[in-house]
Image: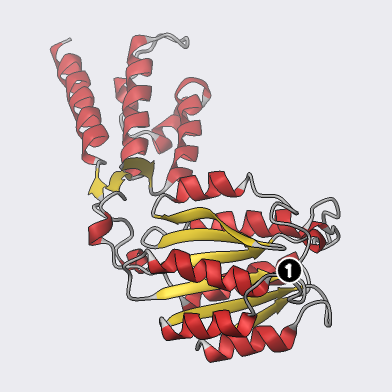
Amino acid sequence: MSHFEFEYPYIFLLLLLIVCIYRCPAALKKIIFPHISLFSLKTGWFNRDRLLYSLIFALMISALASPISYDSKSSHQRKGRDLVFALDASGSMGESGFDKEDNSQSKFDILKSIISKFVNERYDDNVGVTVFGSYAFSSVPLTYDMNAITYLIDFLDVGIAGENTAIGEGIANATRILQKGEAKEKVIILVTDGYHNSGSVSPKDALTAAVKKGIKIYTVGIGKKGEFDKDLLQLIAEKSHAKMFSAADSVSLQKIYDEIDRLEPSRIRSENYLYKHALYLYPLLLASVLLLGMLLRRQAS
């Protein structure tokens, strides 16, 4: 799938200078615009010369903003990892007060928001999502389509898999998702705010199966000390050669995902985009042609 965007969209703030073409004093215009002599002496917003010059200026700003197209479809060229989020959606994840600035949001809502931001920066990874409560199920299969992931995550809610906490089934289901991927590096990011108390698969059995397949499991405990099984999460992370984190609030949770982002970087960042094509020449060429036309018409008159 081909995508289009500007690498430096903030450059478009310079378009505000177009107002100066019409309203600034002549002395100021000479400083900002080198071709002030091209302007007609006539005033008014619909003066042909000024409108044309405004168009030229807008095209040059568009070129400066660096329009690009890139292709993120060709999965056989990707060199990232297979990454699955195992998210606790038990009843306790519906508790509010996790965000000190917004007490109305639940822990699960904050988690979804942070994950959506995280996956949108994983251009080169194959990402999936499993949800666990009393049982576990695959909510998003492995995919490179990050827009689809963020869209589907919005539909997840507390209690969707039951009110209890089946950590073992969460790991086991995430492992099954990863078996369908072909990347050499496989990662699970397990997030929970409680203790394992449900499901037919024990966390240790699920961990053993994941370790045999070379899967790293980063664990994140949400809540205050004692509210989640820190010892179990530490064991899971250590045995799988990963790291355990704890988050007492939304700020610390965001920092955790920032650190995981550094520990498991998306390789495409070194290349910026997959199959990137610079398009700035098109608006720049059109602006040059229009400017040349203005100069020739000026000389002829």
Horizontal and vertical percent position of residue 218? 56, 78
Coloring basis for residues: secondary structure
Image quarter of the N terminus: top left
Horizontal and vertical percent position of residue 169? 61, 70
Residue at the image position 37 percent from the left and 64 percent from the top: 180
- Is disc 1 placed on a helix, strand or loop? loop
Instruction: Examine the image and state in which quarter residue 199 appears.
Output: bottom right
Residue at the image position 42 percent from the left and 37 percent from the top: 32
Say left or right for 121 vs 94. Answer: left
Density class for disc 1 (Cα within 10 Å; few <14, some 14-19, many ≥20) is: many
Say left or right for 97 vs 271. Answer: right
Horizontal and vertical percent position of residue 194? 77, 73
Image quarter of the C terminus: top left
Compared to residue 15, the image places residue 82 above or below, namely below
Horizontal and vertical percent position of residue 179? 40, 69
Residue at the image position 36 percent from the left and 61 percent from the top: 124
Tell me if I can see residue 242 in this picture.
Answer: no
According to the picture, the residue beneath numbered tag 1 turns out to be: 165
